Amino acid sequence: MIAKIQSVRGMNDILPDEAEFWDQFEETIRSWLKSYGYRPLRLPIVEPTPLFKRAIGEVTDIVEKEMYSFVDSLNGEPLTLRPEGTAGCVRAVIQHNLIAQQPQRLYYLGQMFRHERPQKGRYRQFHQVGVEALGFPGPDIDAEQILMGARLWDDLGLEGITLQLNTLGQPAERACHRAELIRYFEEHKEALDDDGRRRLYTNPLRILDSKNPALHDIIVGAPRLIDHLGVESLAHFEGVQQVLRDAGLPFQINPRLVRGLDYYNLTVYEWLTDRLGAQGTVCAGGRYDGLVQQLGGKPAPACGFAMGVERLLALIREAGGEARAAAIDVYVVHQGSAASRLAARVAEGLRDHGIDVLFHCGGGSFKTQMKKADASGAAFAVIIGDDEANAGEVTLKPMHPLGEQPNEQTRVRVDDLADAIISSILNQEDS
Ligand code: HAM
């Protein structure tokens, strides 16, 4: 026996039942984004490796150990499968000069790749919807993006998603805080774990994000960034909170919230659920005013967020959301050579009228074909044998009559078939 080839660990196939659920989700997402004036972008999945090193930061988990990087064997160029979308989006905005004239509200949707340990809600290939606004400096857009999230949870019928908010201030304020943090952690060096000691001088802020319970007390006593913020940073933070309070949106300020990517300043936030186990962050983002310049563009403010599609879909299912089965209108059953030729024309003719048709392929008796028609979930079977073909007619059989409608089959002239089906569908919808 030839060995079967399996998909790569942590990279999942999305089969039709599931994929239809994804399609419906994406429809909701696109109309929600449109209602806020966001426009789509389609970006490459592969980017030059230095893009992510520069944007996300050399000393981050993503860049240090999670990127799928390789060298292009033809020209030696270092490339990486995108681990997130913000870097590529900003690269594209700079490359095509998109914010020269006016600010932009943009979004993208697609695969991301991180070499993490797979578990429920955490995959090596996963999907994000990423939302980015470039060229807006004020807290109004940060707040609008947060309110967008709240509206989407509502549109999707999701409850219990809570908001945690923090500010990271500006780089100079962070540098000052960082120096003090290092001094503080040096004083407690013997109590740090290996990760903590390793990060002490490279990324002490990440120690605050440690999940190790043994570090809890040291972390609680650490110097706070908020005490190092200047008037403008505090005003920006207050501005975001004001809009959220005005909108009646509850949130929790979490001073220990630091993100796993280095490009953020000022506002950062995460939307969390406790219904998915350990991987409870369904959406996260914030402001990244330095990134456009850092990637070679003219300085421009920006902020955005991304949500994990797998996690949100798991949550929708958990809340009882089911995919609507993709309904097919007609299954065409046929036997005999004249009948089959007519049937092929009938099927195309119905599609001309916008009717969805499954044309039976592969022959077989009327009985087996009717079983397939039934299993397909089609609303009607159109049956064509030699008898019908000779008369220029077909037999129309409702398969899943709604309400009181009798399950009677009728003979219909080929020319009248589309009208008969459409009026019958409309009647069913009315009753
Ligand atoms: P992130 O927090 O790294 O941010 O990812 C955003 C979301 O993607 C997470 O909250 C989570 O729902 C989902 N996610 C991340 N990793 C995985 C995984 N391995 N498996 C399943 N889902 C995952 C970013 O990527 C930023 N680019 C967000 C952003 C956009 N900030 C500004 N603009």
Image (cartoon, rainbow, N blue to C red):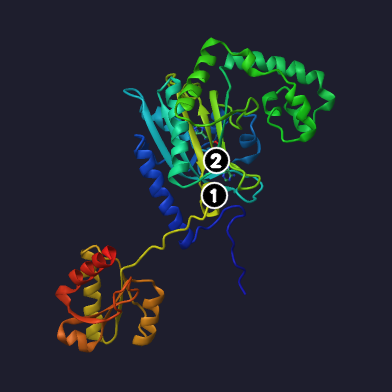
Q: Quadrant of the N terminus?
A: bottom right
Q: Is residue 91 visible?
A: no
Rendered location of residue 313, percent (x, y): 51, 50
Say which amino acid is labelled 1: Leu
Q: Which mark is residue 278?
A: none
Question: In the image shown, does 146 or 362 lie closer to the viewer?
Answer: 146
Q: Residue at x 33, y 71 (%)?
A: 403
Q: Name the amino acid, label 2.
A: Ile
- Residue designated by label 2: 161
Examine the rendered structure and indicate whether residue 182 appears above or below residue 359. Answer: above
Residue 233, image x, y percentages? 53, 15
Asked where in the image residue 99 lies, by quadrant, the reply is top left
Q: Residues within 10 Å of mark 2 (few under 14, many from 20)?
A: many
Classify residue 387 by image quadrant. bottom left
Asked which secondary structure carries label 2, the reply is loop
Numbered disc total: 2
Q: Which corner quadrant of the figure contains ligand 1?
A: top right
**Residue annotated with mark 1:** 315
* Callouts 2 and 1 close, C-beta under 8 Å: yes
Judge left or right: residue 280 versus residue 338.
right
* Residue that appears at 62% across and 54% down: 9
Q: Determine if residue 12 is in view.
A: yes
Q: Nearer the viewer, residue 424 or 129?
A: 424
The alpha-carbon separation of the residues under discs 2 and 1 comes to: 10 Å
- Is 208 rendered above or below residue 316? above
- Residue at 72 percent across and 36 percent down: it is 211
Give the position of the C terminus as an image quadrant: bottom left
**What crowding class fits label 1: few (fewer than 14 Cα within 10 Å), some (14-19), or many (20 or more)?**
many
